[in-house]
């Protein structure tokens, strides 16, 4: 597939459209981008990012609002530049993700740098399971592929996307990198299998920077009220696994994976432990805000006001 058809199909994926059109665009991306050279693919996705930022659609507007809460000291021009960088980082994630299955494993591993990797390896090598909580920052798929390639096979949960074809493509993609993917809904409950995996000494990284369900934990993230899932802390507490926040960020053409201090869920409880995870996320997001790919509402003050209840008779 030549670059021009790839550009057209991918632009449909990152713009508004029907679910089927978006699914078709993503599938075309997976089929076509892997055939391009890395330089050519990067240039292609930079073009898409520039057009996406220039249109300043709903997703870019939301990204800018989120970044304004992470870095409130920035003036209008600086915030716009950070948003531009954020859109380019987001499209870089997709470029890499489309290409990851074709990367040589040695190259995939060699281009990762780690900070405090012992916080993963020490409990894992001792046979103790590790539950990781991650934000949508940097490239979590690359981090998962790195873990699989370096002796820590991943089992995780993925939201069941619509249409089903798109979800199936995501599962096939992540499975090709060595991960075991459990559906969040529409199948067997994922928690028992995750717990079994972790109790056996396995590694379970879970995205954990946004949860609007009734069971979410209220936290302070980047100085603002937000809601995060209780799942990682609850799973660690139930299984005795280590709870380790992990963040990723770009460093040139490399990915840096940072392993934060283990959170002692047994001593703190689920709610306080989740706040400790939010604290680790805050440090990472303030340090590398452009790599936070959050294009949805996440802060409580940005959520729609609940509709008032009718008066009882």
Image: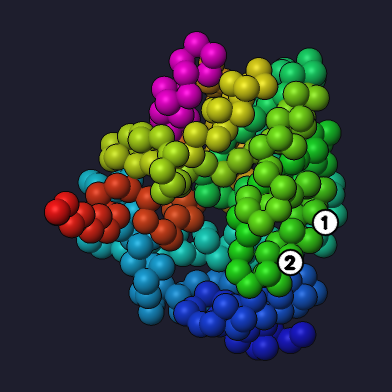
Give the residue at mark 1. 176
- Say which quadrant the N terminus sits in: bottom right
Q: Is residue 229 left or right of residue 303?
A: right
266, above or below 138, in the image: above
Q: Main secondary structure of the magenta part?
A: helix
Residue 8 in sight? yes
In depth, the one of 292 and 173 nearer the eye is 173
Residue 40, quarter of the rendered image: bottom right
Q: Earlier in the sequence, mark 2 or mark 1?
A: 2
Which coloring applies here? rainbow
| Residue stretch in magenta | 265-280
**In which image quadrant can residue 171 be found?**
bottom right
Q: Please give left or right for residue 36 compared with residue 60 in the image.
A: right
- Regarding residue 25, the answer to whether it shows in the image is no
Kindly identify the residue that appears in the image at 71 percent across and 79 percent down: 28
Determine crowd level at label 1: few under 14, some 14-19, many 20+ residues with C-alpha closer than 10 A: some
Q: How many marks?
A: 2
User: In front: 305, or 298?
Assistant: 305
How far is mark 2 from mark 1, CA to CA?
10 Å
Q: Position of residue 53 (x, y in %)?
A: 41, 72
**What residue appears at the point 34 percent right and 54 percent down from the top-left corner?**
66
Q: Quadrant of the C terminus?
A: bottom left
Q: Secondary structure at mark 1?
A: helix
Residue drawn at point x = 52 percent, y = 41 percent: 208
Query: Any magenta on residue 125?
Result: no
Indicate whether 147 appears above or below 118: below
Describe the element under mark 2 as helix, strand or loop.
helix
Q: Check disc 2: other Cα within 10 Å, few if <14, some if 14-19, many if 20+.
A: some
Name the residue carrying label 2: 169
- From this viewpoint, which residue is outermost toward the front? 313
Above/below status of 264 relative to 76: above
Percent position (x, y) of residue 38?
72, 67
């Amino acid at each position: 597939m030549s670059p021009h058809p790839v550009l057209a199909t991918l632009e449909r994926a990152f713009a508004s459209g029907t679910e089927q059109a978006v699914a078709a665009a993503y599938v075309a991306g997976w089929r076509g981008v892997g055939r391009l050279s890395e330089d050519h693919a990067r240039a292609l996705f930079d073009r898409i990012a520039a057009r996406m930022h220039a249109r300043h659609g709903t997703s870019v507007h939301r990204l800018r609002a989120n970044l304004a809460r992470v870095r409130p000291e920035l003036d209008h021009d600086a915030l716009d530049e950070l948003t531009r960088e954020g859109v380019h980082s987001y499209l870089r994630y997709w470029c890499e993700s489309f290409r990851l299955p074709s990367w040589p494993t040695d190259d995939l591993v060699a281009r990762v740098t780690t900070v405090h990797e012992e916080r993963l390896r020490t409990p894992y090598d001792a046979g103790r399971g590790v539950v990781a909580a991650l934000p949508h920052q940097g490239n979590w798929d690359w981090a998962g592929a790195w873990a699989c390639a370096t002796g820590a096979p991943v089992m995780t949960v993925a939201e069941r996307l619509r249409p089903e074809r798109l979800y199936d493509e995501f599962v096939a993609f992540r499975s090709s990198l060595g991960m075991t993917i459990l559906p969040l809904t529409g199948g067997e409950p994922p928690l028992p299998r995750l717990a079994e995996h972790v109790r056996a000494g396995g590694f379970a990284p879970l995205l954990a920077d946004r949860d609007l369900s009734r069971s979410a934990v209220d936290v302070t993230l980047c100085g603002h009220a937000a809601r995060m899932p209780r799942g990682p802390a609850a799973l660690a507490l139930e299984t005795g696994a280590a709870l380790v926040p992990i963040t990723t960020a770009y460093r040139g053409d490399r990915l840096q994976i940072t392993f934060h201090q283990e959170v002692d869920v047994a001593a703190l409880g689920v709610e306080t432990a989740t706040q400790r995870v939010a604290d680790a996320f805050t440090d990472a997001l303030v340090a590398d805000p452009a790599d936070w790919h959050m294009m949805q509402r996440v802060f409580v003050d940005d959520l729609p006001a609940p509709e008032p209840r009718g008066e009882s008779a």
